[in-house]
Amino acid sequence: MKNDKGILHGRPKDPSALLDIIRDVQGRHGHVPEEAVSGIAAHLGLSKAEVRGAVTFYHFFSLEPRGRSTVYLNDSITSRMKGRAAVAKAFEQEAGCRFGEVSPDGSIGLFPTSCIGMNDQEPSAIIDGVVFTQLTPLKVGHLVRALRAGKPAQVLVDKYRDGANQSDLVRSMVANNIRRRGPVLFGPHEPGAAVRKAVAMTPEAVIEEIKRANLLGRGGAGFPTGLKWDFCRREKNPPHYVVCNADEGEPGTFKDRVILTELSRLVFEGMAVAGYAVGAEEGVLYLRAEYDYLRPLLESVLDGLRRENLLGKSIAGSRFDFDISIKLGGGAYICGEESALLESAQGKRGEPRNRPPFPVQIGYLGQPTTVNNVETLCAAAKIIIHGASWFNSMGSANSSGTKLFSISGDCERPGVYELEFGLTVRELLDIVGAKDAFAVQIGGPSGAMISRRDFGRRVAFEDLPTGGSIMIFGPWRDLFEIIDNFMEFFIEESCGWCTPCRVGNILLKEKLEKIMTGRGTRQDLADLENWGKMIKAMSRCGLGQTSPNPILTSLQNFPELYEAAVSKSRDVLPTFDLAEATLEAARLANRRPALEEVAHE
Amino acid sequence: MSKPVIATASLAGCFGCHMSLLDIDDRILKLVELVEFNKSPIDDIKTFTKPVDIGLIEGGCCNSENVEVLRSFRKNCKVLVSVGECAIMGGLPAMRNGIPIKECLEEAYLNSPTVAPEDRMIPDDEDIPIILDRVYPLHEIVKIDHFLPGCPPSADLIWEALTALVEGRPLNLTYDMIKYD
Amino acid sequence: MSKLRFTIDGKPCTAEPGQTIAEAAKANAVYIPTLCHYEGLPPVGSCRVCTVRSGGRYMASCTQVVTDGMAIENMVPDLEDMRRAIIEMLFVEGNHMCPTCEKSGNCQLQALAYRYQILVPRFPFQFPGRHIEAVAPKILLEHNRCIQCLRCVRSVQTKDGRKVFAQRDRSKKRKIDVDAKLAAGLTDEEVRKAMDICPVGSILMKEIGFAVPIGERKFDREPIGSDIEKGPER
């Protein structure tokens, strides 16, 4: 392959370039062919098995062709609630293949994908890197015919939406849907103010200010940011790194997408502030592959900051040098876990590391690293400008400041809302127009599913913590279907490294489906609870430690639903059905399937 | 007092577990004193003639007849025991479980080199049991009370289990009794 | 440096600084069941069988380093049941036909199941469709039995650091991939080592098998871990 020699030409023989090379090959050929695997392996000094291992870990890379045009249709529950089934059917009819396949003429490949961060404008899909929102069967027919005729996906975007989505660098039909602007993220911002003020302080003073502000990580885990920076700074061996986690993958979250679209300057300023605080000269923004369409915009903002001397050498006249590069993911929820993200940023499979050591000790390229969420860095920048007291004057007792919420599901006004921490779920539902909500998923599938009984509880780290994903379900929804979708998500996104997460989630889902089909018993409910707790205790990283939550929290908060679905017997009822089990063999032998004996209990 | 009644059957198995039962050597004389056999290939009683206390089943379920026999055992036995790897997890017959039933039947009856061209058909006689889509462990079809692993389970394990069940005491399992091969 | 003091189920133990819980336990004649762990290879914490509890937190003893004053729970009933569940998961996840397996009697997964006296797993068998690969002249790769311990990935490398075995795919599709060309270049001794390092019967050297008669195999008579419980040899 002469072309691929071009891709490899001039690349350093450094395994950390592996993912970037794979991405280029995938982009050029629509897959990573065998010859390319050999070429890459030889170039980087890896085995072919290692190269295939990296390709196959990520959802958007493939060893087999995925069609001249590749459709990734979002499979989140909100997408399903907004008509995904009809849209998927239209895709299949129009393309002439099923999901998971490529059309016989090789022109269209159809694949499902985990939440792409568009839950407020579903059903949505990524087609050849271009996002299409609010799809309908009618639009799908038009799209597939045009793609088949060879039109590039970008020219099929008929309408550019609000804000920077309509800039020349984005030209996207993605809508921001900013419903409520609060004082921290969306308050007035004089560009450069945070960096200029920070470099005039000592790094210790910057950390002290963040500590006093009690800023907790906005990705969901809620670790104190000031403490993290302090730990990182105290590590002796330079260089230190700042990594911005822009890999929001929790189903139902999309607020970082809006921040990156509208407030990327603030994000980068926050990274520079963090860099100054921990003593780093380099920052990396790890961007989820789903948001690749924002990369040209982000690169141009970085260029602007360099021109303004807010990045680069001797920033704002100080002795502080700092610059930022962008690294892309390849489609893997697990890469939102900070150590998995670092592995991926180093060009490897995105599998979590053993902790300890923590990234502040041994992080990016083995060096001390602070990994912070997009929104956290924005808040940090604002705290430096306005002070810790200002930040502390907002929010609840243990959760200072505001939070950006991604609201989706059964409500009148889905979108992003910047609200102070500490409001009740009921207040939140009033604001977004969801008075008849029956169940609310706080913090995405890894969070909690709560019932009306808990709508008086507060959204804050001390009560109901969340990275911002709030999904609302009306009384007409089938909660089992929702929980099942969440379990499917975790099964798909588990890296499979450890036993409980790799195997256990499948067993939980099977058990749930047994109950859904009316074959469950009380013993099955007890099993669900015991197995769920065991998976949480034994799993290696946050994914497995939270993946049983959809089942465990719904068992706790909707017990009547489960009770009504199972037989009162304590014995496990077998799922075996003789007619079903003999159906295929009977068909092949041209016979009647064996009949179930009637009336055996 | 009448003696406890035992029934046994081999489903999709090789009778190896029954052989192992006979392998208890001279203890078999004691067994005959302890229990009475009902439906079993050992005494060739073909149908249940009275309620049974302990049912021992070797082999998994690979066809509709296996399912029928298993269910009749469950109906007629107070305690049902899965004996051996095949009963517990399908065993060697379950090596076909990853293969679609269509491929299995075609390989056996249509494409096998030992099938004469004129004989190439999937048997369709209504009297033949129908093969299941896969081999099922017994406990996926009926409730099973005890499990004795091994291929076959050792005579010592079978003896210990039988005497414990007859005496109504918990099984005393030593390390050497539990083996999967 | 002075030794660290800690306890396992109340028993006073000592450890060298930097020692993992699994290593330190062994040195103190305390058995913590392990499976993916292999002395001399970097730990990965993949099987989770060695999970212990300290201060209410669960941790893999093969990756977690001992800290001074730690009070570790090991052989407590709820933890033992969860370990047992992990072993059962590994059995239902693959196709473990012990009677046909060359490694039977010497298999560490099977040995753990013996030790825990597992008569039947609590989980339904998955019967996945998996394959056997005969990619290299000397190696059989039996995917039905693989438990993703990553021992082969960690240990079998070429002189210039290329991994002969590597992980492929993710989640339930995850499997071990092999670089056929590099595998073909392995010496007999290296292949034998790879087979020995595999805790189950996934990596097999062609043309040998069932070499040791039943009754004389590693775990025929004594449970796995007995050697550790007897204490270090003097």
Image (tube, coloured by chain):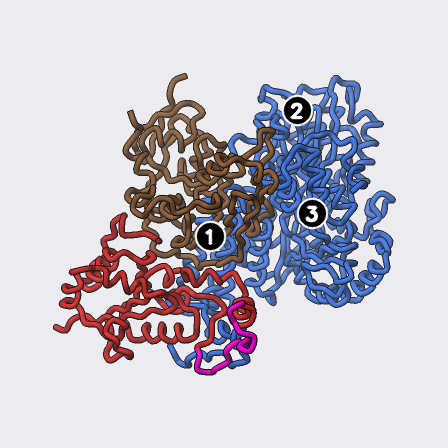
Q: Secondary structure at mark 2?
A: helix
Q: Earlier in the sequence, mark 2 or mark 1?
A: 2
C162, B110: nearer the viewer: B110
Q: Amino acid at mark 1?
A: Gly
Is residue A310 highlighted in magenta? no
Q: Position of residue A559 (x, y in %)?
A: 47, 61
The colour assigned to chain A within the rendered structure: blue
Image quarter for residue A97? bottom right
Same chain? Circles 3 and 1: yes
Q: Earlier in the sequence, mark 3 or mark 1?
A: 3
Dot 1, how many residues are within 10 Å of its Cα: few (below 14), some (14-19), or many (20+)? Answer: many
Q: Secondary structure at mark 3?
A: loop
| Picture layout, residue A542 above or below residue A227 | below
Same chain? Circles 2 and 3: yes
Instruction: Tell which chain the image draws in red.
Output: B
From the image, tell me which residue sits under label 3: A61
Tell me the mark number nearer the camera, choosing from 3 and 1. Answer: 3
Residue B3 horizontal side relative to residue B119, left or right: left
The colour assigned to chain C within the rendered structure: brown
A435, A208: nearer the viewer: A208
- Tell me, for residue A162, which label it has, or none: none
- Tell me, for residue A277, which label it has, or none: 2
Give the quadrant of the N terminus of chain A. top right
Q: CA distance from mark 2 to mark 1?
A: 41 Å
Dot 2, how many residues are within 10 Å of its Cα: few (below 14), some (14-19), or many (20+)? Answer: many
Q: Which residues are magenta?
A: B113-128
